[in-house]
Image (cartoon, helix red, strand yellow):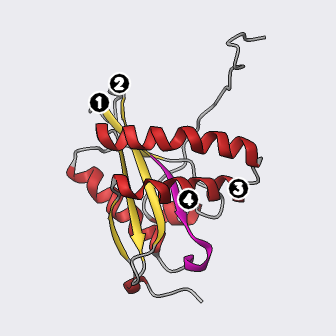
Amino acid sequence: MAKKKSEYAVRPAKAADVQYLVEQRRALFMEFGREKRAVDRMCAKYRAWVLAGLKSRKYRAWVATGADGEVVAGAGLRIMDWPPVPVDTTSRRAYVFNVYTLPPHRRSGIARMLMKALLEWCGKNHIITVALHPSDDARPLYESLGFQTATEMRLYLPRDGKQT
């Protein structure tokens, strides 16, 4: 049974939380059915990326802890340089990813708490465009927070750089 929202606390992540952020990213991709070896390779590189991002302050993360101090959820964002567009003439955007809650703690409002902390930080730091790619299960949460559907296309180039 999920705990009540009041039993959790949200705080900014620190370098000491990197192990939890990596474990959550691993669990997220495994739940999406990704191959274990590929996830292991990703996580080895992700750990260094998160540490560098926290140090440079281009990556921000928040974690939620239970009453016992255990980290049970997390969310991160990458601050990106972006060219001004008509609806946002600033030059920074935030991209949200790795919003993850351990299964026993789901449906208790933690993801909403994390997102509100993250969005509050963006507002205080004058970041007005925030993007993410939600899972189908998470879409209602993000819509309730005001996110709107947008279009994007993506191409993955071969590792050798040669496009056919």
Residue nearest the viewer, comparing 108 with 58 = 58
Kindly report the distance in space between the C-alpha atoms of the residues bearing marks 1 and 3: 34 Å
What is the magenta range?
96-106
Task: Tell me if mark 3 has few (under 14), some (14-19) or many (20+) residues whose alpha carbon lies within 10 angstroms of its own.
Answer: some
Which is nearer the N-term, disc 2 or disc 4? 4
Q: Which residue is mark 3?
A: 30
Residue 24 is at least partly visible in this image: yes
Q: Please tell me whether residue 45 is drawn above or below residue 147 in the rendered image.
A: above
Q: Which residue is mark 2?
A: 83
Which is nearer the N-term, disc 1 or disc 3? 3
Which is nearer the N-term, disc 1 or disc 2? 2
Residue positioned 38% across, 54% down in the render: 61
- Residues under numbered marks 1 and 3 in contact, where contact means CB atoms less than 8 Å apart: no
Q: Which residue is mark 1?
A: 91
Kindly report the distance in space between the C-alpha atoms of the residues bearing marks 1 and 2: 5 Å
- Camera-nearest label, 2 or 4: 4
Q: Helix or strand or loop: what does disc 3 sit on?
A: helix
Q: Amino acid at mark 3?
A: Met
Q: Amino acid at mark 4?
A: Gln
